[in-house]
Every structure is written in structure tokens, then in C-alpha cells.
């Protein structure tokens, strides 16, 4: 393991992660000692419209993957419409490789609660929900205790801190479905229905939860709000790049020495991040990696110096996504990795639309055949065509995400496929599982 | 002004290079269809909300990164759309989706019911690849599974377009089916297993469906019809025919007064299935399961094929030639006419033409006004109400009016049970147009809940008082376009129809009378009433009679000018031996207010002629039985509750004759030319009849009755028919009857406490005549009111109790004798047993 150089170390910008290592920061008294709820007090003195403007000025963009400007989203909520407004926090973090919201909610749950109160105040919502992944039991427990403590201290409930603003916050555990991270499926699930994406328009800002104006934001987005309120828009913009402002939690996994979360300004490169993570594991050379979870087209070693912000990654034909970097080396098989991802997408497809439901079923079986040494050259053409027939044809983005690794690995690593088909690589799956296939 | 408004409401777009103007908000797929560009689709259905699930209808829209589903994309000004005809991207996308859909779809078209009329099959030919590249193992499921006793599901054929679940939820409000599981294992299913507390399917199949919540929606058949593949099939039609061997005839439904357009498909002299017809003004594209599957009565083995006359020597009915039977009938009627007169009783199965034949026959051949179509509890007040407020097109509310009404007050009518298509339209209006429904009823039934009705709690008999005094009801009717919709049950509530007429006059609300049977409204206008001649002409009005006389070719003095006896009067007179004879067509004594008295009347009448399709309690007592054609073997017209004519041609040409033709033959022997021999002649005669100038009689003003006093274990009976019950028009359709609602006795908490019974315990409802024992359902009813289904398995109210709605009955806990009904859904055995004991005429 190599120590990162000083100038690289200085690229770390612990903002959202700053309390993670403080003992018991998840308790409200500790949190309060560490600047906790200071931003709330400041925010409640400000007009909600000014808060929305502040977030707009900060350039904060959604941390859930799409990077939509947060202030703009809040501004879409019609004010004075007589309808209840809702804030829903998407804590259904399920993108393969992503692990930024769970530790935040586990180690610093109050920062999310504080962000929720400020954001609800800004959009004039009196009811907020955290939709948390069902499997994240420990984080949910921490959140519930944080909410309880916040109620006890008067940060939640009626007339918060004497401001006249009321807010109720409910922590809702999902039942473990990747699709429920899609915001409209999440809303359906929250309403008690089957989690499947809704037709848009109407967009949640007009008709979201219970057909009322709703903001759905990622955990990281909302947790950023208190820091912006405290530090101001200019301080926030001092991190990151011009169009991708602020710090970002990069979750690194795979063939590196120290997998984990590294919070740096947007625009850092993978080369620097790997250095921060202690370098590649001995004997491993970077072969391919995902910039933001498996749904984002994977990149190769030649992209190691791409600035990891929304624009930089898009310029390489990929997406920043959730900044979940899964790092694969020359000892990893891209075909096998793609198959594993596909099994995930196949398992998690909600079934609503044809291309995702049937296409994944088909591709998974084709991969199993290729990995069993039963593949044909025609399979590669069919796979690419199938992926093309899914990509951009499905109801929501999940289908695109599933087609992405197939197209990317076929594009970058066709030889690895041919090696299985032509017998140069030993089969990794047993043909026994292929009953019925020819 | 309107031109300007129009311009802002339309947009101009280009589809495949052709400029087209469309309404704002219209879907691209519809606009393309109007232009003659067929974009393939599965999940899209014009009457269901857009889903965008199947993705088959992808098109290219300029400026959009991805192909767009044209079934969810609304038009925009300047939009440039390219379909598969001009865009390679769209064509490729559609071929891709089709390949996905076929990947897991079995190639069992040769044995699939849908083969030959299958949208998947057709569009696979037009927009699919010639060969599959899919070499993997196809998905398999146990096939088929029952989701109700009537509906079967082959899940491996399903393409998960969700038309069925969307129909059930959006249109019918019966969310009994839903998507289960996810990914490639996603499937349509009912809520299976005990967790959901279902009672099984009642299909008599051991081990299957136990604990499941069956798809017992009255509208379940529509899901089969809109299924774009063969995943949903009906037990009744499954494996019976190939679509291309069937001959289709557009027809009309003979069951209720909703007036559904239908399509009957027959092959080799047998109707094999019926489908909902398209009629945007009436039933849109839906019908109910009774209309779809209730047609086997016409081929039941008790169908009468030849005339029967009672043999003088043996006293038994024997087959006879038509000439002998007609002569016997004519001579008998002639003698009976001289010996006290002949009463004419007709029932709900009659077409307008046949009803007109009876009305004319009674007046011209029998010289009497003793004719009544009301084969059910009735009142003189009702006859007056029909004359003043319904007959001759006075009530002209339409489905369209229902859809656009701001408010509707429903009295004495349970729309889902008694007029299911009216119910669907009410539901559409309540969900999409903000119709406010007020139900004047004893309790908020499931049907009323589904149309979001506000309940004005009313015990049977209290209707007149509520309508006269309730401020909420009057306020609801104050809005322009508000409707007052009343059912035939109000006839048994004294003063109610008087109050209805008065309320409508007071508030300006429009009035609709919704009878239960297809022939009822037509019979009113055809003159099958003791106080009305055809066209709503009062019999007492000499001028009205004079209008009619030339049309009928008789001297004005021939037509009797005094009101005749109504059904009850005819029955009473015949039972007392005062009538010389009875002419009965389509009446089952079990439907009448007092079946026992009706049978006495048939026994005591000197001479009974029965025109009937199948053996019945009337034919068994008749002196002459003349077989007539069921609806499918004749042409004719039903008049639905709107007053709309629903003409239909002959589906199956047979030798069976209409009632009108038989009556004409009898009349000829009585030396009267009736001119009702064929339907076209009657239509011409009706069409040539001058419009009536007779003044409309005044509405009845019967004083409201008071609720009878009841002892501690007595209650007022509320009762109405279930849609699917023991009626004789459902004989032979046991799988359909398996989807019937369970027979229950509904009691309020007060009665449950005083009787000491819990939900599901046996409760006996009795009168001096007999009792009905059923499991109790504790319902939010007014004090001391009990509800029973009128004619369901284990509950034939009129026959067992001899009373009807509004009567006082006794209640006791437990079974008085053997429990007639098994627990709900316990199988068709009970139904069959009940059928053998002979239900009433639908």
C-alpha cells in the first residue's frame, strides 16, 4: 500500500462526512455540539423563497445520479395552491456498488433530518418521508431514533423552534426493490401500491405523493442543505467545478487497497481517487471501472484522468451516476462481471414493460450459455441487438441501465467474449444449468 | 368566439409527412389511427388510461433522444412524428419489442382460443421477424388456472399488458386481479392463499382455489374480450370453436334494461359465445357477465319445440299440431272471453314488437284492458306514474346525460345488481366527471361505495317521506342537469313514486325510470298496461282511442274505454274464478308478489293459453302451450331504460315463431286481422302511427305510508335481486353462477345483538308462510331492517315468504329447519339443487 501524496490528500473535502468518525455523532447532543441544528435555526429566520434562491445560487445538483439542479426542482412546487406539499427523501440506495447514503444515515442521521426540516420549510411541506431500503435495518434504526430525538427537542412536530412551522417526518422502510429507487415507483410504493414507475407527466412536482406537489430528493442532496445554509453559496461553490459544484462522496470498491467513501470536490479524477484509496491491490492493473454504479456505461484504464463531474464523465459517453466506482483489474473477467450485473437487473426488473422484463430474461440466459462454453458467434450479434432493443425503449431508466454493461463490454472487450466462444477461456458455469437450451 | 376557442384547442402536427390537426391532449396513436396509420399496440385501449407498458407502439418523434410510446405521448404543435412507415428507428424498435413479446410466448396458436382473432398473432405477422433468435428455454407455468369458476388464466400466454387489471380497477372497480411477483416471473393473478381471507371459487374443484379471493366481478368477461392474447379464456367457450368458423351477428342483450349492444357468434345452429358490442352511446365496449354468458337457457332441454294441448281424456299435456293447437286456443279464448273475459299477463322477455302484439290482441281480439307486463310486485300508483312520467318518451334521460350530470339521486335501485351498464356509466361519471351520487337506500352497498355515493339511510317504505322532506336530496337535485333515477322497486313503497314525481317537478331534476328487465320499458310504450294504449295513450281518453282506432282498422267504439285490471287484479280475479281465461307470455309465478296465489289463479282460470320458450309453472297449468322463439331465434327490438330502441336481427334462423306471429294466427281464427305476423310489419305500423295528442295524465298523489310497527324480533324486509341469481334465464350456466355473490341475510347491529348472533351465524327470516335461513352479515342498516336477496340460492323471498320489500318479517337465530344455502361459494351443487326446485323467471 502506498501513501497518497500530500497534494492529493488535500483534495479531500470532508463536509457531509465530517462527523462520521466522531464518536456517537448519531446522538442528538453530540450532533448539536458539532454545529448540529445551527443551520436550521438560521434557516427558519429566512423566507422560504430566499432559501430556494440560496440553493439555486449554490448550484447544488441532485446526488442520486441524474444531477438535476436542486433549487430548480424546489422552485417547481406551486406555492399557494392550497394542496399539501410533500418532501420525500429517496434513501433506497440500491445501485450496485453504491454506498454513500447508508453510512451517512448510520453515522450522521441528524444531518439528514436537519436537511429535511430546512428543505420542507423551503418548499412549504408539513409532511416529509424518508423511504429507506428495507435491508438497511441498522441505518433505519438510527434514523428512527434520530427522528424521535428531534421530536423530543422540538425540531420536529408543531411550531418548530417557535417559528410557527410544523413538520412531521416518517421513516418508511421499503420491501427491498431496486425499482423503488426510481422516484415515481418509490411514490407508488410509499402510497402502499406495487412499486412500478408511473407515467410522466404529470411530474412529482405537480402530482407526486397522493397526487400532490412533491419533491423527491436523494439523501446526499438533502444532507448537503444545512452546510449550504451555514456556509453560504459561495463557500459551496468553492468546491467542485463551475457546473458541478460542491463536494461529493465517492464510494470506491473493487481491486484497491482501501475501499470506502472518499469525499472530494466534484471533478476529481479516478487516478487521484485510487491514490487516496492506497493504490491498486498488488499485482492488479486497472482494466475497467464504473463511474457511477453499474447502470453507467463502464470506462477503461484510458479514462483514468477523466474529471469526475457531471460534464466530464458525460464527455466520455458515460454518466456520473451515484459516483459508485467499482474498480476491476486485468484479473477480472468483463463477461463474468456483466453476467452478474445482468442477473441483478433481471432479478430487479419490475416487470412492467416488455423490453426490460423479457430482454433481461433473454440476455441472462445467453450469458449463462456463453459462460458455460456453449456460446456462438451469432450470440454476440444477438446480444448487441437485444441490448440495443432494450436501450431507450423501456418505460424507465432501469432498462437502459441493464443494457449499458452489455453494450459497453461488447464494445471494449469483445475478445473476452470470443475467448469463451472459441474455447480459449475455460467455462465458468456448468452447462447443467442450461436445461432446455440448445 | 367559438372559432377562436376552437383554434386554441387544436394543434397541428405532422405524422409520416402528412400534416394533421388534432385536439389538444389527444394521443399520437389515436391521431395516427384517424389518419389510417395503424401503429401496432397491446396495452393501449381507448377506454383505459394510458399505461405505456408493452412498448409496442414506439414511434420516432423529432427532437426526442429515444423512441416514444405513441400511446402515452400527447400531441404538440409542430410535432413531427414518424411511425414504422417512414422511420427505420420506429420500425426497428417495434420489431425488437415484438421479438421480446414472442420470446416467452408459447407457439400454441393452433390450440389457443384466440388463434385467428389474436392481436399478437396478427401484429407478429405485420410487425415481427420471420424467425426467432431466441433459443433459450421458455417460461412455463401451470396451465390453466381458475381465477374464478368462469375465467381461466394461462399465464405463459400472458404478455402482461395489464389491460385486464386496468379494466378491473378503472372501469369495474373490482380489483380482484393484480400483478404478482416481478421481473420475468411477473404474472397476473388473484389474491391467492388464506392470507387474503377468500372463500374460494365455488367451482366444485377440490383443492383448487381454496382460500383465494376469486375474480367474482360482474364484469369479468370484458377482461377476456380485451385480452390481446389467449391468456384469459372463459370456461364456457374454451376449446369450443375457432373464430374463423363462427358466424357473427350484431344483436342486443335480452337480460336487463341497460340495452347493451352485443355480438352473438354461432356455428352449426348453436350460439357459442356472445361478446360486448361497440356502442359509444350505450355500453361503450363493455357488457356484464350475465349478458355475455347467460344464453344457454335457450338450448335447455326443457325447451318446448311443439305445441302442447291438455288432453281432455288424460288431463295431461300432449303434443299437438300447430293447427290443432291454434284452433283449441282460439276456441278456448273465445269461450273464456264470453265467460268473464280473458286477462293477459306478459313478462320482461318481450320485445317491443311482441309486447305491441299482446297489447293489440288484448284490445282488439279480446276486447279488454286487462293486460299488464309487470310480472313482479306492483301498484296502481306505479301504473299512474308510468302514464304520467315515463310512457311515450316523456322520460328521455340518456347515458350521455348521466355522464355529464352534476348530481344523481338514486332511489329504489341498486345499479350494479339491476342495471350494470348504467352502473359503469355512473362510475365513469363519478370518477372522471365529478358526478355526485346520492343513494336513497337502506345501506351503502358495495356498488354504491364504488361510485362514491353519499347515503341517505332509508328503510323500505320510508322513501316517500325522505324524498318529500330530506334537504340533502332536494339540494342535490337543485343543480342544472341533476338526475333523479328510480327503480321498479318503488312500486312496493306506497307514495314513493308520487313523491318522486313531485320532487322532480319541484326541483326541475330530470327523471329516469330504470326497470330491471329488457322488455319493460318497451311494454310500457307498447301498451301492455291496464291504463295505457300504445304510445302512452290513456285508455280513458276517448280522443286517444279515436287516434288509435283507424291505425288498427277498427271502429272507435270497439276499444274498451275503462282501465283494466293490473297483474294483481287479474290474478285475484282469476283465483276467485271471475275470469274466463288467461293468456300468459313470459311470466313465472315465482316472480309475482304472491306466487301461491298466482298458481291458484292459473289453476282456477277456466282456460289458460301459455306462449313460452321452456316448461314453467305456467305451462304445467296451461290448457294450450304454444312454443315461441327465444331472443336469439327472432328479430325484434328492446327499448332500454333510456327509451332507446335496440333492434336486433335473427341470430339463428329456426322455425320458432315470435309471440306476435302466434298471436296473429290465433287472432285470425277469431276473425281479427292483427297484422303482427312479422317484425317489419309491426315496425311499419308503429312508425306510421300518428304522434299522440292526448293530454298526459296527472302524476299520482298517493299519501306516504308510515313504517309499520315491529316487535323486538321483527323487521322490515328490504330485498332486491342479485344480478346473477336463480332466474330462469341463467339456467344451465353453472360456471357463471359460481361467480354470483353469496346469499346472505343482512341485519343491523341492533338485531344481531337482540338475536345474539355473530357474523356468519345462521339467521332465519320467516312469515306465516315459511322461512329463509342464511348466514348473517352484520351491516350498517337502519334499526329493525333486514335484507335478503330476492331470488338467490337459498333465498327465494316471494315463494318462501310470500311477501316483498317493505313487509314485516320475523327473525330468529339459528336454523328453523334445514339450511337451504350452503356457506357462500361452496359450490355449484347447491345452485343446481336450487335450479331443480325452479327459480323464478330471471
Image (cartoon, rainbow, N blue to C red):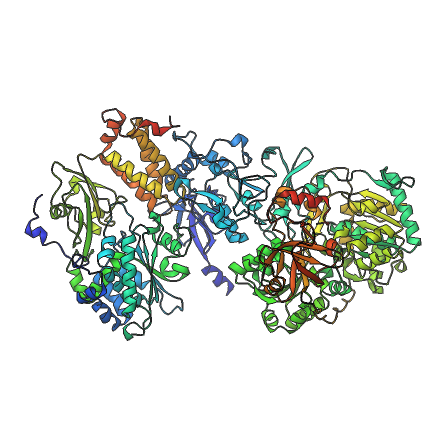
Residue at the outermost top position: A423
Q: Is residue B230 left or right of residue A118?
A: right
Q: Which residue is at 52% across, 63% downward? A: B434
**Residue closer to the observer: B359 or B37:** B359
Name the quadrant containing residue A391. Answer: top left
Q: Position of residue B77 (x, y in %)?
A: 41, 54
Labels in figure, total: 0
State whether residue B131 is above or below residue B299.
above
**Residue closer to the observer: B709 or B301:** B709
Q: Position of residue A307 (x, y in %)?
A: 16, 49
**Residue closer to the observer: B388 or B619:** B619
Q: Position of residue A56 (x, y in %)?
A: 24, 63
Name the quadrant containing residue A141. Answer: bottom left
Q: Position of residue B619 (x, y in %)?
A: 81, 45
Q: Which residue is at 31% across, 50% downward? A: A135
Q: Is residue B87 left or right of residue A328?
A: right
For the N terminus of chain A, the image quarter is top left
For the C terminus of chain A, the image quarter is top left
Q: Is residue B64 visible?
A: no
Q: Is residue A151 visible?
A: yes
Q: Is residue B116 left or right of residue A6?
A: right
State whether residue A172 is above or below residue B622.
below
Amino acid at each position: 500500500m502506498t501513501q497518497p501524496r500530500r497534494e492529493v490528500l488535500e483534495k479531500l473535502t470532508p463536509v457531509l462526512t465530517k462527523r462520521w468518525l466522531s464518536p456517537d455523532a448519531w446522538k442528538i447532543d453530540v450532533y448539536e455540539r458539532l454545529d448540529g441544528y445551527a443551520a436550521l435555526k438560521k434557516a427558519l429566520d429566512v423566507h422560504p423563497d430566499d432559501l430556494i434562491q440560496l440553493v439555486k445560487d449554490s448550484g447544488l445538483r441532485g446526488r442520486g445520479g441524474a444531477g438535476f439542479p436542486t433549487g430548480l426542482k424546489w422552485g417547481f412546487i406551486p406555492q399557494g395552491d392550497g394542496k399539501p406539499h410533500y418532501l420525500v427523501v429517496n434513501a433506497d440506495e440500491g445501485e450496485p456498488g453504491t454506498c454513500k447514503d447508508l453510512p451517512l444515515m448510520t453515522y450522521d442521521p441528524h444531518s439528514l433530518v436537519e436537511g429535511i426540516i430546512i428543505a420542507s420549510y423551503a418548499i412549504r411541506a408539513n409532511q416529509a418521508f424518508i423511504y429507506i431500503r428495507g435491508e438497511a435495518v441498522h441505518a433505519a434504526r438510527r434514523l428512527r431514533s434520530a427522528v424521535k430525538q428531534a421530536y423530543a427537542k422540538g425540531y420536529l412536530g408543531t411550531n418548530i423552534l417557535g417559528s410557527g412551522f410544523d413538520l412531521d417526518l416518517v421513516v418508511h422502510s421499503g420491501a427491498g426493490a431496486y425499482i423503488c429507487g426510481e422516484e415515481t415507483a418509490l411514490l407508488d410504493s410509499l402510497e402502499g401500491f406495487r412499486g412500478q414507475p408511473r407515467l410522466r407527466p404529470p411530474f412529482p412536482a405537480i402530482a407526486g405523493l397522493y397526487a400532490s406537489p412533491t419533491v423527491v430528493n436523494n439523501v446526499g442532496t438533502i444532507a448537503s442543505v444545512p452546510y449550504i445554509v451555514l456556509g453560504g453559496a459561495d463557500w459551496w461553490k468553492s468546491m467542485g467545478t463551475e457546473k458541478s459544484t460542491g463536494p461529493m462522496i465517492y464510494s470506491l470498491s473493487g481491486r484497491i487497497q482501501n475501499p470506502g467513501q472518499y469525499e472530494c470536490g466534484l471533478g476529481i479524477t479516478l487516478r487521484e481517487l485510487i491514490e487516496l484509496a492506497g493504490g491498486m491491490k498488488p499485482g492488479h492493473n486497472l482494466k475497467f471501472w464504473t463511474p457511477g454504479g453499474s447502470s453507467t456505461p463502464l470506462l477503461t484504464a484510458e479514462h483514468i484522468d477523466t474529471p469526475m463531474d457531471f460534464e466530464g464523465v458525460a464527455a466520455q459517453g458515460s454518466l456520473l451516476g451515484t459516483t459508485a466506482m467499482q474498480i476491476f483489474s486485468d484479473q477480472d473477467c468483463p463477461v463474468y462481471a456483466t453476467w452478474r450485473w445482468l442477473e441483478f437487473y433481471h432479478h430487479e426488473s419490475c416487470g412492467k414493460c416488455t423490453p426490460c422484463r423479457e430482454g433481461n430474461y433473454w440476455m441472462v440466459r445467453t450469458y449463462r450459455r456463453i459462460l458455460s462454453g456453449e456460446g456462438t458467434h451469432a450470440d454476440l450479434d444477438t446480444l448487441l441487438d437485444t441490448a440495443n432493443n432494450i436501450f431507450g425503449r423501456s418505460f424507465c431508466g432501469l432498462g437502459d441501465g441493464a443494457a449499458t454493461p452489455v453494450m459497453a463490454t461488447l464494445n471494449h472487450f469483445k475478445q473476452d467474449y470470443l475467448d469463451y466462444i472459441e474455447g480459449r477461456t475455460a467455462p465458468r458455469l456448468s452447462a447443467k444449468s442450461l436445461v432446455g437450451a440448445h | 368566439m367559438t372559432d377562436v376557442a376552437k383554434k386554441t384547442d387544436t394543434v397541428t402536427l405532422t405524422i409520416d409527412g402528412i400534416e394533421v390537426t388534432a385536439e389538444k391532449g389527444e394521443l399520437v396513436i389515436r391521431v395516427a389511427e384517424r389518419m389510417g396509420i395503424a401503429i401496432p399496440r397491446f396495452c393501449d385501449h381507448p377506454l383505459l388510461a394510458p399505461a405505456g407498458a408493452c412498448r409496442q407502439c414506439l414511434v420516432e418523434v423529432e427532437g426526442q433522444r429515444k423512441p416514444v410510446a405513441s400511446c402515452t405521448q400527447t400531441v404538440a404543435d409542430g410535432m413531427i412524428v414518424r411511425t414504422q412507415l417512414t422511420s427505420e428507428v420506429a420500425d426497428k424498435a417495434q420489431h425488437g419489442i415484438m421479438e421480446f413479446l414472442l420470446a416467452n410466448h408459447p407457439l400454441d396458436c393452433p390450440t389457443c382460443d384466440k388463434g385467428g382473432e389474436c392481436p399478437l398473432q396478427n401484429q407478429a405477422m405485420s410487425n415481427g421477424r420471420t424467425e426467432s433468435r431466441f433459443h433459450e428455454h421458455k417460461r412455463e407455468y401451470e396451465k390453466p388456472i381458475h381465477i374464478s369458476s368462469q375465467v381461466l388464466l394461462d399465464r405463459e400466454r400472458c404478455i402482461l399488458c395489464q389491460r385486464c387489471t386496468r379494466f378491473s380497477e378503472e372501469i369495474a372497480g373490482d380489483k380482484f386481479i393484480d400483478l404478482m411477483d416481478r421481473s420475468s416471473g411477473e404474472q397476473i393473478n388473484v389474491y391467492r392463499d388464506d392470507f387474503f381471507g377468500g372463500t374460494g371459487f365455488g367451482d366444485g374443484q377440490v383443492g383448487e382455489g381454496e382460500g383465494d379471493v376469486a375474480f367474482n366481478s360482474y364484469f369479468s368477461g370484458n377482461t377476456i374480450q380485451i385480452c390481446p392474447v389467449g391468456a384469459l379464456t372463459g370456461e364456457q367457450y374454451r376449446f369450443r370453436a375457432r373464430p374463423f368458423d363462427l358466424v357473427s351477428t350484431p344483436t342486443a342483450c335480452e337480460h336487463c334494461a341497460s340495452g347493451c349492444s352485443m355480438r352473438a357468434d354461432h356455428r352449426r345452429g348453436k350460439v357459442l359465445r356472445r361478446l360486448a358490442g361497440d356502442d359509444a352511446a350505450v355500453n361503450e365496449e363493455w357488457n356484464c357477465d350475465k349478458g355475455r354468458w347467460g344464453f344457454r337457457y335457450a338450448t335447455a332441454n326443457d325447451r318446448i319445440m311443439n305445441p302442447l294441448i291438455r288432453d281432455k281424456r288424460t288431463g295431461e299435456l300432449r303434443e299437438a299440431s300447430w293447427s290443432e293447437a291454434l284452433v283449441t286456443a282460439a276456441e278456448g279464448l273465445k269461450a273464456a272471453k264470453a265467460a268473464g273475459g280473458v286477462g293477459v299477463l306478459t313478462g320482461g322477455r318481450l320485445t317491443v314488437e311482441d309486447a305491441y302484439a299482446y297489447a293489440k290482441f288484448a284490445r282488439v281480439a279480446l276486447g279488454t284492458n286487462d293486460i299488464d307486463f309487470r310480472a313482479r310486485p306492483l301498484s296502481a300508483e306505479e301504473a299512474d306514474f308510468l302514464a304520467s312520467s315515463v310512457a311515450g318518451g316523456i322520460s328521455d334521460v340518456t347515458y350521455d346525460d348521466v355522464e355529464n350530470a352534476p348530481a344523481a339521486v338514486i332511489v329504489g335501485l341498486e345499479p350494479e345488481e339491476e342495471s350494470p351498464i348504467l352502473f359503469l356509466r355512473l362510475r365513469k361519471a363519478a370518477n372522471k366527471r365529478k358526478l355526485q351520487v346520492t343513494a336513497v337506500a337502506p345501506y351503502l352497498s358495495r356498488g354504491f361505495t364504488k361510485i362514491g355515493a353519499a347515503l341517505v339511510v332509508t328503510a323500505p317504505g320510508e322513501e316517500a317521506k325522505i324524498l318529500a322532506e330530506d334537504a340533502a336530496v332536494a339540494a342535490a337535485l337543485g343543480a342544472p342537469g341533476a338526475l333523479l333515477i328510480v327503480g321498479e322497486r318503488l312500486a312496493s313503497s306506497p307514495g314513493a313514486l308520487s313523491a318522486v314525481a313531485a320532487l322532480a317537478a319541484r326541483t326541475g331534476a330530470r327523471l329516469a325510470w330504470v326497470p330491471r328487465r329488457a322488455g319493460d320499458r318497451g311494454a310500457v310504450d307498447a301498451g301492455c298496461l291496464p291504463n295505457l294504449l300504445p304510445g302512452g295513450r290513456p285508455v280513458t281518453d276517448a280522443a286517444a282511442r279515436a287516434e288509435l282506432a283507424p291505425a288498427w282498422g277498427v271502429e272507435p267504439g270497439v276499444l274498451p274505454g275503462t282501465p283494466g285490471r293490473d297483474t294483481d287484479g287479474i290474478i285475484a280475479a282469476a283465483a276467485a274464478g271471475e275470469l274466463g281465461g288467461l293468456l300468459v307470455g313470459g311470466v313465472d309465478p315465482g316472480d309475482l308478489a304472491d306466487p301461491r296465489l298466482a298458481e291458484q289463479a292459473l289453476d282456477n282460470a277456466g282456460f289458460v293459453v301459455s306462449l313460452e320458450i321452456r316448461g314453467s309453472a305456467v305451462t304445467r297449468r296451461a290448457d294450450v302451450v304454444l312454443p315461441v322463439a327465444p331472443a336469439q331465434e327472432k328479430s325484434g327490438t328492446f327499448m332500454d331504460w333510456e327509451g332507446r330502441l335496440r333492434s336486433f336481427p335473427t341470430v339463428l334462423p329456426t322455425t320458432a315463431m315470435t309471440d306476435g306471429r302466434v298471436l296473429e294466427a290465433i287472432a285470425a281464427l277469431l276473425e281479427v286481422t292483427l297484422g303482427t305476423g312479422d317484425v317489419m310489419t309491426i315496425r311499419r305500423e308503429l312508425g306510421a302511427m300518428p304522434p299522440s295528442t292526448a293530454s298526459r295524465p296527472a302524476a299520482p298523489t298517493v299519501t306516504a305510508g308510515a313504517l309499520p310497527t315491529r316487535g323486538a324480533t321483527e323487521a322490515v324486509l328490504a330485498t332486491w335481486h342479485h344480478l346473477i341469481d336463480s332466474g330462469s334465464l341463467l339456467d344451465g350456466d353453472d360456471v357463471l353462477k359460481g361467480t354470483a355473490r353469496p346469499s346472505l341475510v343482512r341485519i343491523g347491529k341492533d338485531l344481531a345483538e337482540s338475536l345474539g348472533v355473530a357474523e356468519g351465524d345462521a339467521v332465519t327470516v320467516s312469515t306465516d308462510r315459511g322461512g329463509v335461513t342464511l348466514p348473517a352479515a352484520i351491516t350498517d342498516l337502519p334499526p329493525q331492517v333486514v335484507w335478503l336477496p330476492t331470488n338467490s340460492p337459498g333465498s327465494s323471498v316471494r315463494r318462501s315468504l310470500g311477501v316483498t320489500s317493505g313487509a314485516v318479517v320475523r327473525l330468529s337465530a339459528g336454523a328453523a329447519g334445514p339450511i337451504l344455502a350452503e356457506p357462500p361459494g361452496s359450490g355449484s351443487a347447491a345452485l343446481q339443487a336450487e335450479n331443480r326446485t325452479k327459480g323464478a323467471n330471471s
